[in-house]
């Protein structure tokens, strides 16, 4: 029987929100109670045009978990959510002015990653998941390229939020990374379905939603990480997967014989360590 207790199960994309949800400490404790070991947290969008405060809040949340929740390791990524652009446009700002603001915020994110050992990447950054005008699309791509340059300069990972995940996006993000000399192996496509083969082909790293697609993915390749994209909003229960899903799904994969213990270590420990240059217990 596999000793699930000891597998360092990692959720690669989690948001916490102490105003609207359980908050950092409680989320970490629930995750731990389900057998989770490592959380990768990302700042939430502010939706108010205040781009750096969510990064500062994330740092406090990580420090809270580190101090108060034994047995959970926590790391974070800071970035400017691509949807902030449309929010700021709705508030009457010009696209040029927005771009400048986002670049400033990304420079701040860079400084934070350089200063805090538990910040291991830039994200989420990318493009809105809904249809936008040509100029918003172009600006989003320019900002994504700038984010990639930061990741290249400081040698960290980058998580992309995008409109979808298909071969076309994998190829495009690989080409964008290469154009600024960023190793595509450091570029994670968040919110993937069963995209392991595209990942192997284009070297972009898939972070797969821990629902059904992960079963199909694991049959083909172990080059992926798992996530819930938990948003910690008590007014929107069921909008995303619960924080216990990654441990539960992993147990299921083991029970079904789709992965063995070694496979679980690959997904949750080795892949994570390589992506973020960290060492997990
Ligand atoms: Zn997210």
Image (spheres, helix red, strand yellow):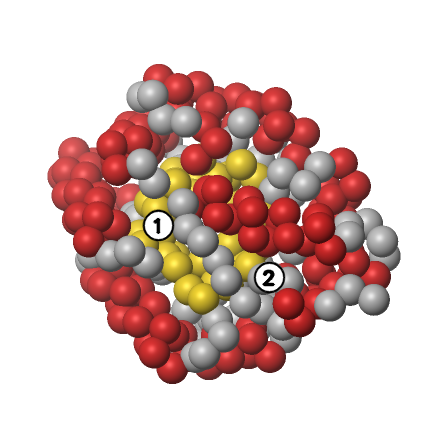
Query: Is residue 196 shown above or below 88?
Result: above
Which quarter of the picture shows residue 48? bottom left
Q: Which residue is mark 2?
A: 9
Q: Indicate left or right for 228 with 116 as reference.
A: right
Residue at image x 59%, y 31%? 199
Query: Tag 2's secondary structure?
Result: loop
Disc 2 to disc 1: CB gap under 8 Å: no
Position of residue 249 in the picture relative to residue 80 (left or right): right
Per the model, the C-alpha gap separating discs 2 and 1 is: 18 Å
Say which quarter of the image contains residue 249: bottom right
Residue 80 locus on image (x, y percent): 30, 48
Q: Position of residue 164 (x, y in %)?
A: 55, 37
Q: Along the line of sight, which residue is nearer the eye, 40 or 102?
A: 40
Mark 2 or mark 1: which comes first in sequence? Answer: 2
Q: Which percent across, then down, holds residue 161?
A: 45, 43
Work out whether residue 98 can be spotted: no
Identify the element where label 1 is drawn: strand
- Can you see residue 274? yes
Query: Is ligand 1 within 8 Å of the beta carbon of the residue shown at mark 2?
Result: no
Q: Which residue is mark 1?
A: 120
Q: In which quarter of the view is residue 184 placed?
A: top left
Image position of 75 (left or right of 89): right
Q: Nearer the viewer, residue 97 or 251?
A: 251
Residue 270 lies, in percent from the top left, at 56, 47
Badge number at residue 164:
none
């Amino acid at each position: 029987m596999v000793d699930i207790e000891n597998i360092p199960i990692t959720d690669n994309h989690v948001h916490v929100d102490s105003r609207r949800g359980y908050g950092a400490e409680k989320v970490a404790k629930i995750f731990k109670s389900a057998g989770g070991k490592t959380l990768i947290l990302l700042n939430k969008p502010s939706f108010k045009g205040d781009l750096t405060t969510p990064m500062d809040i994330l740092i406090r949340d990580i420090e809270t978990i580190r101090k108060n929740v034994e047995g959970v390791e926590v790391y974070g990524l800071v970035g400017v959510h691509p949807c902030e652009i449309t929010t700021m446009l709705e508030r009457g700002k010009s696209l040029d002015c927005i771009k400048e603001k986002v670049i400033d915020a990304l420079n701040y994110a860079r400084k934070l990653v350089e200063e805090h050992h538990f910040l291991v990447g830039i994200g989420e950054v990318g493009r809105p998941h809904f249809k936008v005008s040509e100029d918003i699309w172009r600006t989003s791509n320019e900002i994504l390229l700038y984010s990639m340059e930061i990741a290249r300069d400081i040698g960290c990972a980058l998580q992309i939020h995008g409109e979808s995940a298909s071969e076309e996006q994998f190829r495009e993000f690989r080409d964008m990374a290469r154009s600024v000399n960023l190793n595509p192996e450091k570029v994670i496509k968040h919110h993937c379905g069963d995209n392991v083969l595209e990942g192997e082909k284009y070297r972009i790293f898939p972070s797969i939603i821990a629902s059904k697609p992960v079963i199909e993915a694991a049959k083909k390749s172990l080059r992926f990480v798992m996530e819930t994209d938990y948003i910690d909003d008590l007014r929107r229960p069921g909008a995303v997967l619960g924080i216990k899903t990654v441990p539960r799904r992993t147990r299921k994969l083991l029970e079904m014989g789709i992965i063995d213990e070694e496979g679980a270590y690959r997904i949750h420990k080795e892949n994570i360590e390589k992506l973020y240059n960290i060492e997990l217990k």
